[in-house]
Image (cartoon, rainbow, N blue to C red):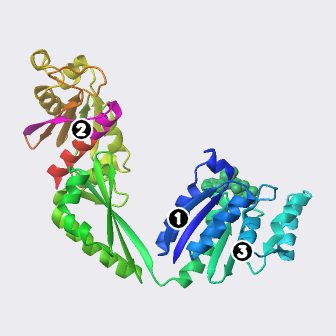
Amino acid sequence: MKCEIIAVGTELLLGNILNTNAKYLSEKLAELGLEVYYQTVVGDNLQRVSEAFKKGVERSDVVIATGGLGPTDDDLTKDGLCQALGISMLLHEPTLTKIESFFKSIDRIMPECNKRQAYIPVGSIILENNNGTAPGILLEVNGKISVLLPGPPSELIPMFENSVYPFFKARTNSILKSKMIRIVGVGESAVQEQLREIFDNQSNPTIAPYAKSGEVHLRITAKAETIETADKMLYELEDKVRDIIGNNVYGCDNESLEDVVIGLLQNSNKTISLAESCTGGLISQRLTNVSGASKCFMNGIVTYSNEAKQRFLRVKEDTLLQHGAVSSETAYEMAEGIKRVSGTDIGLAITGIAGPTGGTAEKPVGLCYIGLAYNDKVETFKLMFAGNREKIRWNASIKALDIVRRILI
Ligand code: ATP
């Protein structure tokens, strides 16, 4: 079924509020296997709301509108729908009684304008609203379904879940299920190149790349009659992707790189300590975002100055003088130092120039060294990152976490 969403509200057009209802509805409709082809935002204007509905029912099987069901004059969604379909409204007594009792229950007299909310397009099914006065509307005319839901998400979401979702679930014989495959260490174009054959021959499941800062995510989506079949289709495609992309695939769905690293540390009974300079504690922060990290994360210290590197990590003065704070030698001694003072299995260190100042021709902004002390060995990695300070620090944190991930798998 082709579907579209119309969000009604001038405040959406002015940017005063974000159209989170469209995001919510699109996700839910996809889950039901309904294809959302259009999203429209229209202001509180009868003519334009009516045109949006006219266009909607012309080109889609289902139109879901949100907002504009309130009691005031600028709440025009029902009028817009009626004008578009050429139907009228009738007073729905049970709804009026419900609104009146609501006002009685809060010891207030119902304002006359609230009566508007009890007028319903002829032929509608009423969708109960247990969190507000505006009822929802479901109307089927000439095989086209229109659904009207109130704007406040606290009203819309329960109504969608209690009434709209089951209605469509009973009418569709397919579901859409998606999975996100998370990749690190290769760029989006390299991923596309390696998966060229899969991309070119996709139909069901489909595959689409999403470039994230420092990572690539692939959304794979299967359409099937049952969840079990969709899951099977997704697993098969994921397997193919993993065969080609290998260890660069680090996780799925909401699993973050830090979740994976903490999981690997816990499974292998290893502990880690960190000495951070240019990332200022970002890597420690990311690791400690993971609940249960204390089992394997011993400590992280930010040794930003040369003095701190010497005092806490025993980096040699000579090393700093000869090679500088941003050097392979310093990263080496930082990693060795933090592992020793913390007594952990792994010592991870990072030093670099996040910019925008501090770069030279020899050591430009974006240059970072990562040191990894593990198994009586210290390895260092020289890396160059592009972008502003925030991006350099973020991408450096990804690389550092990924280095730990790779030695643990
Ligand atoms: P009410 O019954 O409260 O008058 P309504 O159906 O008339 O609701 P609107 O008046 O259009 O809805 O919007 C009421 C509030 O709902 C907005 O101020 C906003 O907080 C929220 N809202 C409306 N539309 C959206 C949307 N598309 N996404 C997220 N929130 C929205």
Crowd class of label 1 (few under 14; some 14 to 19; many from 20; radius 10 Å) = some
What secondary structure is found at the residue carrying circle 1? strand
Q: In which quarter of the image is the C terminus?
A: bottom left
The picture places residue 133, in percent across and down from the top left corner, at 78, 63
Q: In this view, does 162 lie to the left or right of 219?
A: right
Front-most of residues 265 and 94? 94
Q: Name the residue under label 2.
A: 273
Disc 1 designates what residue?
38
Observer able to see residue 68: no
Q: Which of 281 and 376 is in front in this view?
A: 281
Residue underneath mark 3: 85
Q: Which of 184 and 187 is in front in this view?
A: 187
Residue at x 36%, y 61% (from the top left corner): 253
Rendered image quadrant of residue 41: bottom right
> Is residue 166 toward the left or the right of residue 266 in the image?
right
Q: First in sequence: mark 2 or mark 3?
A: 3
**280 w.r.t. 119: above or below:** above
